[in-house]
Amino acid sequence: MISDNDFYQARQSIELLRARMQYDVMGRDDVINLVLVALLADGHVLLEDFPGSGKTTLAKALGNSLSAEGVIGQMSAFRRMQFTPDLLPGDITGVMVFDPDSNQFVFRKGPIFAHIALVDEINRTSPKVQSALLESMGEKQVTIDNVTHSLTDLFFVIATQNPLDAVGTYPLPIAQLDRFMFKIRMVSVSREAELNVIKSWGRPRQPCNMPQLTVQHILSARHAVREGVACGDIVMECLVDIIRSIREDPRCLQGASTRSIVQAVPALQAYAFMQGRNYVSPQDIQDLALPLFSHRLQLAPGAGQADTVVLENIRQPLERLSRSAMQS
């Protein structure tokens, strides 16, 4: 069990991280919260919206909040990868190069070797390059020339993409989408926030003077969430019932995977933690259902929106969960 002091320290660290990101990104508090939930739950995030909506700014704000303290060797705290149509897999994972001094080939690490990796415009490159991320996102490792190279325990991918009707984009396959814990659609910010962005444009701005977090701060917070937030059996049963209901929906050609349930548990724990609770509630499932499940579904032609399918199929399992919670 986690101690009350450790739980409190973890809360302080994440509140500091949230404050730093809110300082750099205006009007995106809801998106910042979901990104932090995924970071705490050891998942990855896909941000989607049209160009110029602040996706890259938000990702860089997270990366800049991480200190390089304790980062050694060729491992970076934060790296950005700009995906383009001419990119090659080796540009991401790294390549074998010949070292004339030792007269042998050595592995030169690519930008994927970072604690936080920003993949900018992931759907502007070919499926061959997109697939280079599958192993790293799923297993935190990279295999080059039959040699496996481990990534860090923290390893977190935050990717951005433009909507699929934009020119020059490649749709992400289901296998790639399933690696993302959340797909977050960034809607327009409020009128007040947009006015603040315009007024501050071009003016000198004081850099954030709040301290950065170390890798250990975030890993300790992950441990506090895993050990300190209760997720009861009835909650897990509710998740399984939701997934099975979605799979049996005639509008679905392919439902959500088992991986989605596995990822949902730590996501719900992290979300409850962000709300200041040490237990998962039915409302947490209601709040996270769309970013957790919608992007994993493949619907039949003319079946409507994935969001509608998810919302309709969570209703009955959530009602049963609420009744069980009231009786216990």
Image (cartoon, rainbow, N blue to C red):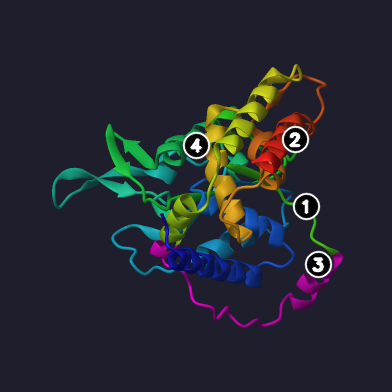
Counting residues from the start of the chain, the first of labels 2 and 3 encountered is 3
Mark 1 vs mark 3, CA separation in Å: 12 Å
Report the disc number at residue 44: none
Q: What's under tag 4, amino acid-wise? A: Val
Please state the horizontal and vertical placement of residue 229, each as a whole percent of the image: 52, 52
Viewer-closest of 261 and 140: 261
Q: Are marks 4 and 1 in contact (CB under 8 Å)?
A: no
Per the image, the residue denoted by label 3 is 194
| Range of magenta residues | 191-217
Q: Are marks 3 and 4 in contact (CB under 8 Å)?
A: no
* Residue 180 visible (yes or no): no
Please state the horizontal and vertical placement of residue 160, each as a whole percent of the image: 62, 48
Per the image, the residue denoted by label 1 is 187
Q: What's under tag 2, amino acid-wise? A: Glu
Per the image, the residue denoted by label 4 is 129
Q: Residues within 10 Å of mark 2 (few under 14, many from 20)?
A: few
Count every numbered label the image shows and give the total: 4
Viewer-closest of 250 and 163: 250
Per the image, the residue denoted by label 2 is 319
Mark 1 vs mark 2, CA separation in Å: 29 Å
Residue at x 58% of width, y 43% of height: 122
Counting residues from the start of the chain, the first of labels 2 and 4 encountered is 4
